Each structure stands twice: as structure tokens, then as C-alpha cells.
């Protein structure tokens, strides 16, 4: 077991923001909340999936809705701990541990402070290895966990019990509830055994995010300077493949909240031979543009007409001059950015997983091609 205290949260949030692929909610707000609560209640215990008892009862917890909402409707501990307590009350089951929906963004911190408050461990793993916008895309239901019963709670303490037959129906129901209850809600869901967690969760992603964030924050300068270290870190992880896709500036960014999601596009333009970060040849040419397609997260990256990365692989954007990750809702005209593609873990390489996470699952008329098989030069 490991301990995650207030002093680890800045690194965790920096790493989780990178893995969030543009979504997951604003990490700064969650960082402040988690630091405050871990100072108040003490550090959280982090348990590896393989150390869970097979008959342990584990519940996934986090926030559901449009990440933009969290910039104005700040989260508190009441919704998350309230949803979990209500879950125990309604189901009559004692929860032995909690696990994040996703390692990406603010949802990486919520289970930690909930675990500290409840005095139970948080599993070092999650259901995505990144951020994704829909419930059926988590590894938990893909590998056999039922999403319901689920208990949701809004910022005003209103709660509801959801009972659904499958993950796709659950996604439609919880998304509609999120819209009706203010745009962002907390949810306790996917109750499962320790044995099922071992089969379905992507392991050690919380501790990996801390290590990744330590690298990014410890540098804090031009991303090019630590690119070799970044590549080495991912090469030794379950992700494996990482590629530098593009460096340029944001010339257009448009998003709207549609059906409880942040939906939009962003256009990047290369710096040209005189700009910084011009190591990609044609990809940095001033006439070259990259388009990012967004649904909460960056889902597809195109240079001209060519797709150079797509979901379920990760598309991660950082500020080129500071190495800080850039969430989609904070993307603005003129920002200088670097774009990286990262291979998804083996959990998303199965036909069952790809059926709900490949580009066509999002409405894009594209076949998924693994990042390692795409030439970007």
C-alpha cells in the first residue's frame, strides 16, 4: 500500500491533466479541494488492484457532466461523500474501497479525498487510463461490471437512484440527469468485487500520474527539453507508444455544450521554420494545420486530410513553453502548444472495447488505426 497526501496532489493533478486528453474537468479546482480535505482528514491509502481481496466490495465514484460547468459551479466534498453514503444506505452494502472512473482530470482526486473521509482505501487504478465522455466506454462494464445500482447527487444535496439494464442505457439516463440537475453531478456506481476489479481496471494509473506530474512540474519550461524523459516514462508503462504529433499555435477554437457534453473543434497552425519547436519538418510548416475534434476530450487529430491519431489512443495537448497540459475548455486563440499521441493500454485493443470506443462510436466515419501503425512524417 502507498499513501497519497496533500503534498502529492499537485503532481497527481498535473499528470492527470495530461492523461485527460483535454477533458476530465479543470484540475486546479479539484487540486485545491483535495489538498484542503487531505490536510483536514489525513492522507488517503492507495491499494494496488492485485492486493484487493477477491470478495472486497469496490464502488467507482466521480463527477459526470460537461467539464466547462466546473469553472463556475465549483465542486465540494458534500456531493461525492453524500452520493457514496447514500449508496451504502440504499443498497445495504458496506463499501471496502473506492476507485476512480478515470485517471484524467479532476476525477482522479475525488476518490482519494472520499477514501480519506471514509477511512477506506482507494484503488491505484481506474476504468479508462485517460478520460472518455461516456459510461459504456469504461473498462468496468466492458469486462462485466454492471453500472447500477447507482446513486447520483447534485450540488444542492438532491439525490436519485438509477437502475438500468446495461451501460448504454445508463449513459443516456445519467447524462439526462446531469443536464437536468445543473450540468454536473457526482455519481457512485459500478459496484463490483475485488476479483472483477483485478480483471477490468487499468492498474497503477494513479501512481503513474503522480510520477508523470512530478516530471512535468519539476521542469516547468519548454516541453522539448524533457521530451526524451517523457518518452522514456511512457515506454516503461502500460501505454508504451508515444509520438510527438505537432507543434503550433491555436488559431481557432469553438465549443458548445450539447446534450451534456462539450462539443467542438480546434485548429492549430505550424510555427514555420523561424518558430520555436520547429523539429517536425513539414508538420511545423507555417502552412500546415492540425484540426482537433472534441467531445469533452480530444478525440481525433488530423493534419490536412490525414488522421494522425484517434480515440481510444490518447491525444494530449500541452502549452509548448510551460509543459502545462491544456484542457479543451481552456484553449484560446494564440496559445502555443505541442500535441502528443499516446497508445491506449491493451484493455482497449479487444473487439468488445473497440466497439464502444473507436471513432465510429462517436459518429466519425473513420476506422481506428493504432497509433504505432500511423506514419506522421
Image (cartoon, rainbow, N blue to C red):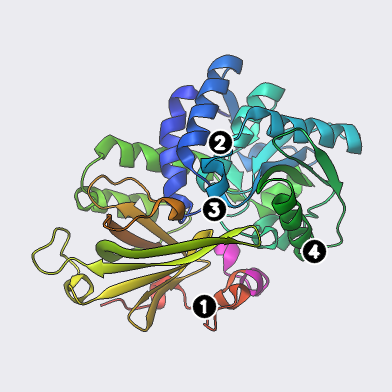
| Badge 1 density bin: few <14, some 14–19, many ≥20, Cα 10 Å | some
Task: Please give the name of the residue rendered at 35% of the width and 49% of the height, measured from the top-left corner.
Answer: 233
Question: Disc 4 designates what residue?
Answer: 169
Q: Earlier in the sequence, mark 3 or mark 2?
A: 2
Q: Earlier in the sequence, mark 1 or mark 3?
A: 3
Coordinates of residue 335 in the picture (x, y in percent): 28, 55
Question: Disc 3 designates what residue?
Answer: 129
- Whether the residues at callouts 4 and 2 have beta carbons within 8 Å, the answer is no
Q: Which quarter of the figure has residue 132? A: bottom right
The alpha-carbon separation of the residues under discs 3 and 4 comes to 23 Å
In which quadrant of the rendered image does the N terminus lie? Answer: top right
Q: Nearer the viewer, mark 4 or mark 1?
A: 4
Q: Earlier in the sequence, mark 4 or mark 1?
A: 4
Task: From the viewer's perspective, tell me whether residue 359 is left or right of residue 7.
Answer: right
Q: Nearer the viewer, mark 3 or mark 2?
A: 2
Question: Disc 2 designates what residue?
Answer: 109
Coordinates of residue 334 in the picture (x, y in percent): 26, 57
Task: From the viewer's perspective, tell me whether residue 224 is left or right of residue 216.
Answer: left
**Range covered by the magenta-colored residues:** 343-356
Q: Earlier in the sequence, mark 4 or mark 2?
A: 2
- Whether the residues at callouts 1 and 3 have beta carbons within 8 Å, the answer is no
- Whether the residues at callouts 2 and 1 have beta carbons within 8 Å, the answer is no
Q: Earlier in the sequence, mark 2 or mark 1?
A: 2
Give the structural element (helix, strand or loop) at label 1: loop
Coordinates of residue 85 in the picture (x, y in percent): 80, 30
Give the structural element (helix, strand or loop) at label 2: loop
Amino acid at each position: 500500500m502507498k499513501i497519497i497526501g496533500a503534498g502529492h496532489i499537485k503532481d497527481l493533478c498535473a499528470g492527470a491533466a495530461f492523461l485527460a486528453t483535454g477533458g476530465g474537468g479543470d484540475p486546479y479546482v479539484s487540486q485545491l479541494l483535495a489538498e484542503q480535505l487531505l490536510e483536514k482528514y489525513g492522507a488517503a491509502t492507495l491499494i494496488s488492484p492485485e492486493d484487493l481481496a477477491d470478495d472486497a466490495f469496490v464502488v467507482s465514484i466521480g463527477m459526470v457532466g460537461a467539464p466547462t460547468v466546473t469553472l463556475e459551479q465549483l465542486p465540494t466534498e458534500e456531493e461525492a461523500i453524500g452520493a457514496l453514503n447514500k449508496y451504502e444506505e440504499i443498497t445495504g452494502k458496506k463499501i471496502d474501497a473506492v476507485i476512480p472512473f478515470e485517471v484524467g482530470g479532476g476525477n482522479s482526486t475525488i476518490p482519494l479525498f472520499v477514501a480519506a473521509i471514509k477511512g477506506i482505501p482507494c484503488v491505484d487504478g481506474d476504468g479508462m487510463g485517460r478520460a472518455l465522455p461516456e459510461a459504456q466506454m469504461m473498462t468496468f462494464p466492458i469486462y462485466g461490471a454492471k453500472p447500477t445500482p447507482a446513486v447520483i447527487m447534485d450540488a444542492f444535496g438532491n439525490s436519485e437512484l438509477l437502475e438500468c439494464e446495461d451501460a448504454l442505457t445508463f449513459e443516456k439516463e445519467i447524462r439526462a440527469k446531469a443536464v437536468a440537475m445543473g450540468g454536473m453531478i457526482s455519481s457512485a456506481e459500478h459496484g463490483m468485487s475485488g476479483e472483477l476489479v483485478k480483471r477490468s481496471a487499468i492498474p497503477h494509473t494513479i501512481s503513474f500520474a503522480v510520477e508523470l506530474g512530478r516530471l512535468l512540474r519539476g521542469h516547468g519550461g519548454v516541453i522539448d527539453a524533457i521530451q526524451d524523459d517523457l518518452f522514456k516514462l511512457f515506454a516503461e508503462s502500460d501505454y508504451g507508444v508515444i509520438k510527438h504529433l505537432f507543434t503550433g499555435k491555436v488559431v481557432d477554437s469553438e465549443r458548445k455544450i450539447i446534450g451534456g457534453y462539450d462539443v467542438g473543434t480546434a485548429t492549430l497552425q505550424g510555427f514555420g521554420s523561424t518558430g520555436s519547436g520547429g523539429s517536425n519538418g513539414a508538420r511545423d510548416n507555417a502552412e500546415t494545420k492540425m484540426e482537433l475534434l472534441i467531445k469533452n476530450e480530444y478525440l481525433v487529430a488530423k493534419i490536412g486530410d490525414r488522421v494522425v491519431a484517434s480515440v481510444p489512443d490518447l491525444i494530449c495537448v500541452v502549452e509548448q513553453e510551460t509543459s502545462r497540459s491544456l484542457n479543451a475548455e481552456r484553449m484560446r486563440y494564440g496559445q502555443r502548444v505541442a500535441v502528443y499521441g499516446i497508445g491506449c493500454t491493451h484493455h482497449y485493443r479487444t473487439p468488445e472495447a473497440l466497439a464502444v470506443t473507436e471513432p465510429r462510436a462517436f459518429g466519425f466515419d473513420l476506422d481506428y488505426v493504432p497509433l504505432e501503425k500511423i506514419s506522421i512524417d
